[in-house]
Image (tube, rainbow, N blue to C red):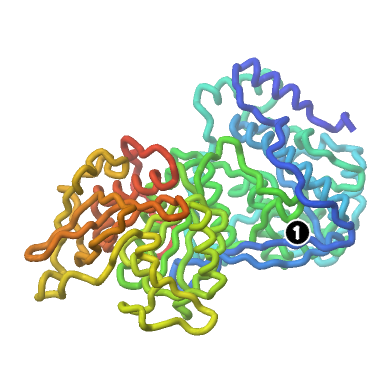
Amino acid sequence: MTTFRTTLRQCLTLLVTLGITGFAACSDSGSAGGSATAADQPFNMHLRSHTETEPNSGRFHVLTKTEKWNPSRTAIVVCDMWDLHHCLNATRRGGELAPRMNQILKTARDRGVTIIHAPSSCMPAYKGHPARSRALAVPKSKNLPKDIGTWCYKIPAEEKGKYPIDQTDGGEDDDLAEHAAWAKKLTAMGRNPRAPWKSQTDLLDIEKTDYISDNGEEIWSIMEQRGIDNVILLGVHTNMCVLGRPFGLRQMSKNGKNVVLMRDITDTMYNPLRAPYVSHFTGTDLIVEHIEKFVCPTVTSVDILGGKPFGFKKDKRKHLVIVMAEREYKTWQTLPTFARKHLGDDFTVSYVFANAKERNVLPGIEVLDTADVALFSIRRRALPEKQMAVIRRYLKAGKPLLGVRTTSHAFSLSFKGDKRPDKGYADWLTWDADIIGGNYTGHHGTEGKGGRGLKVTVTLAEGAAKHPILTGVDPAKLIGNGSLYQTNPLTKTTTPLLIGSIPDNPSEPVAWTNKTEYGGKVFYTALAHIDDFQQPAFNRLMVNAVYWAAGLPVPKKLPVKPKVVATTKK
């Protein structure tokens, strides 16, 4: 079989020659979890998708459903896991993916899953290989879909959204000097530096019971002959080959296969110097989100191997979950825009929106179980008991929370707490004191009677000037556009940061930190009116708070980036 394998040692030798370290091709970032399962037992597949909260809202619930997949009616297609790539970083990441991928293939193969290796433009390397011969021996299907042999650039569902990243430069994210040296070495090997691949990486085993093909008609025929209903795509690159190839996600989806992307066993061609100017890994997240909205669901390798999802070693981002369930201040609009603009380098961000038809339900709140930090904007909700248990579980784990504006009265249905939830739902009347550390008792006056509607002047709290959250924040350039909340007295565990005032009324804390009884850090601000997000000082305050809560160093300066165009409809 070595006749058909690429010598990855050549690649490693080149990298050492260039003095390039960090190539993790031989490392294993994950191991199989759980006990062995009989081959005839189905896989429990957890399919994640984005479902619009209501028509044309541009907001999506992230929902997961479980399906049982019969291994004998399931195929895995390995897309373009080439031996070498013109992008050095892509070559590195492919090498890092491969060991976990090989485990997936072995486990799935042993369970009866059909394995199809699809290294495009590499068929000459496999002439006479048993797996290639098997593919060629399959009769052409009588029900070949139209255009199944061609690239698919878009399906109708994608017209509803905007493609989330700019990949017009090809997506290379190499250091320019490294890239030039890499191209030179590829040329010296006799490889085309723009298309150096000759075969699939030899880090993936190809067994004689597998299939090798890069032809859409052949692959469709294999699936039809074997009675394949379920298809798992993994490999590279999600935004290009995995989506568009004749055997890719779009073709499988539009032609009726129950297809999924294995989202942790893939990569993108995305350059962070292009819009939306986020980290490479956030670029991958955005493509996955696009796929879940408009193409097909996704799963992770955990459904095959158990354990934890694969993660690239250089992906150090924290997972932030933003939960939005209020109507007055439109934070369902401002907070995602804020996160896209300011947090895409160091955070992977998930969003939870209220149910449009049932206000006391938060679909997808279970994502908190995987969060490192949470940001709440919630007003007067009583949740199903299981959903409230998710929030309590998160906080009892000592994890950090940020709250804005109405979150001080997030889980009380009425001002006095006298309105109680229906059976099966739970409120949290002492939430403000228990978690936020505040004492919300309403607004200061009403318009024309003491100041509701007046701009709030903001000043530093005594002794707060050196707090990390206030780094680079000039209170003189910060104005509260919402009415001044009555928040005094705060609990003894709080540290006031900012004070708000309006004429003829007592001053009130408008930003502070707290520490819960479970040890979790809390930041809260009574600001976050929709107009507050137009102020650089407020955005800087929020950025600092997110980093502080996540245990990351607060940026000394916010990076100056080109304007980011929103990727969802408002």
- Of the 4 image quadrants, the one containing the C terminus is bottom left
328 relative to 295, above or below: below
The residue under the point 50% across, 66% down is: 60
20 relative to 503 in the view: left or right: right
Q: Residue at x 49, y 74 (%)?
A: 383
Between 124 and 412, the one nearer to me in the picture: 412
Identify which residue, 177 or 516, lies in the foreground: 516
Quadrant location of residue 126? top right
Residue at position x 29%, y 48% in the image = 541
Look at 73% across and 65% down and name the residue there: 258
Q: Secondary structure at mark 1?
A: strand
Q: Quadrant of residue 75?
A: bottom right
Question: Label 1: which residue?
Answer: 231
Which residue type carries mark 1? Val
Residue placed most toward the observer, 183 or 401:
401
- Percent across and percent down for residue 395 are 49, 58
- Which residue sits furthest left? 504
Q: For residue 38, which quarter of the picture?
A: bottom right
**Image spot of residue 496 (x, y percent):** 26, 51
Query: Is residue 466 depicted above or below 421 in this figure?
Result: above
Image position of 104 (left or right of 269):
right
